[in-house]
Amino acid sequence: MAERVPYTQFLKDVFQLSISCFGGPQAHLANYQRVLVEKRGYLTEKDLMELYALCQIVPGPTSTQTLTSVGYRLGGPNLAYLTLAIWMLPSVAVMTLAGILIGSFQEKEVSLAFTRFIQPMAVGFVGYAAYTISLKTVNTKIGFVLMVASAVASYFIKTPFVFPVILVMAGTITAFNYKLHPKQEKKKFDVPWANFFLWAGVFIVAAALGGITKALPIKLFENFYRNGSLVFGGGQVLVPMLYTEFVQYAKPLHYPTSPSEFLSGYAFVQAVPGPVFSFSAYIGALSMREWGTGGEILGAFMSAAGIFLPGTFLIFFVIRIWESLKKFRPIRASLEGINAANAGLVAAAAVLLFQPLQNTATNFGFMIATFCLLAFTKLPAWSIITAGLVLGFVLT
């Protein structure tokens, strides 16, 4: 890593990445490698891969945490927070606008028929995500059992509070297999708790304020902050949690989001560069459509802040103690269960997302075609979704 890093140039590179990185964490990582390692030499390939591996085991958006961790290593917390803002703002702005437009179309009774093809295509994206996650993380019988059990539980228990229970139980079960992992020499170390207390403090205060005031902007922040504190991996893992809370469980929480709006937004975000977690801004804008344009922007901001901040606080906490923490075998063993459970949650989400759609050959065909295009071609996600939108406009 260079001894002296030009921060302005680094932030310019972050902005270029924010408008050119399509796909999920794996695709983003390839761009980080090309720009940050090969082109600029901000850090070595080994350093980048270690940061990426660390971010995969901490709740939050993996690619966002990896990039902000690079900023943290180069310039401390200030540069890291600037990195986060520049990385997320373009996609958050686009998805906020998408939410405002969809809400306006619905209010004016403008037909959303042009989105009818991208809705089953979105299900295809989720199904493919479940497939790839399971291939990479489910390698044992216990992992397979936990994946299936998690899928069944999240399918039948339609409450948002089931997800943390599933993740904790799955991680606890595989933690007992710690003896399968080699021992590593452990040394006593001091834990800098500041960022952990910051994360926990915001969690508690947001929950308390949401419960006391019942204010929708605060409840949105609390909802996304809670989900951002529990989700591991890319944005596709977030889908089952958000679908349960904002569609299936929407009435008691007063989040008026329909299945078609949810699917359209998830399809849109596939065609937008930057973090998939910016989908939160779209949901936030729709949730506050009754407040007017200003309320929609506020809802998008609160939702985006809620989803991105917890993972940032936690990675800043863990990055300082990782070298010591990873030597504990139960920690490493628990990841098998957490990853397997995530695969099951995403698989169940694909089924739940398809159910509100009409059971037609067209919808089923677009879902399968999208899965096959992702699995057997190198077409970027944005081109697939754009083709679906164009086809929808032409045939409307």
Image: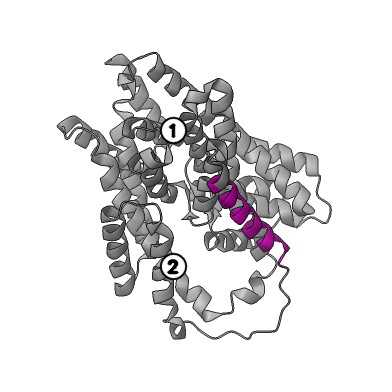
At label 1, the amino acid type is: Trp
Identify the secondary structure beneath mark 2.
helix
- List the residue tagged with mark 1: 382
Identify the secondary structure beneath mark 1.
helix
Which sits in the foreground, 320 or 356?
A: 356
One can see residue 373 in this view:
no
At label 2, the amino acid type is: Val
Which of discs 2 and 1 lies nearer the camera? The answer is: 2
| Left or right side of 371 for 281 | right
Q: Position of residue 63 (x, y in %)?
A: 56, 50
Is 337 rendered above or below residue 275? below
Q: What crowding class fits label 2: few (fewer than 14 Cα within 10 Å), some (14-19), or many (20 or more)?
A: some
What is the span of residues highlighted in magenta in the rendered image? 193-211
Whether tag 2 and tag 1 are in contact, CB under 8 A, the answer is: no
Number of the label disc, if any, that sits on residue 334: none
Majority secondary structure of magenta residues: helix
Which sits in the foreground, 314 or 157?
A: 157
**Quadrant location, the N terminus:** bottom right
Which sits in the foreground, 306 or 10?
A: 306
Q: What crowding class fits label 1: few (fewer than 14 Cα within 10 Å), some (14-19), or many (20 or more)?
A: some
- List the residue tagged with mark 2: 168
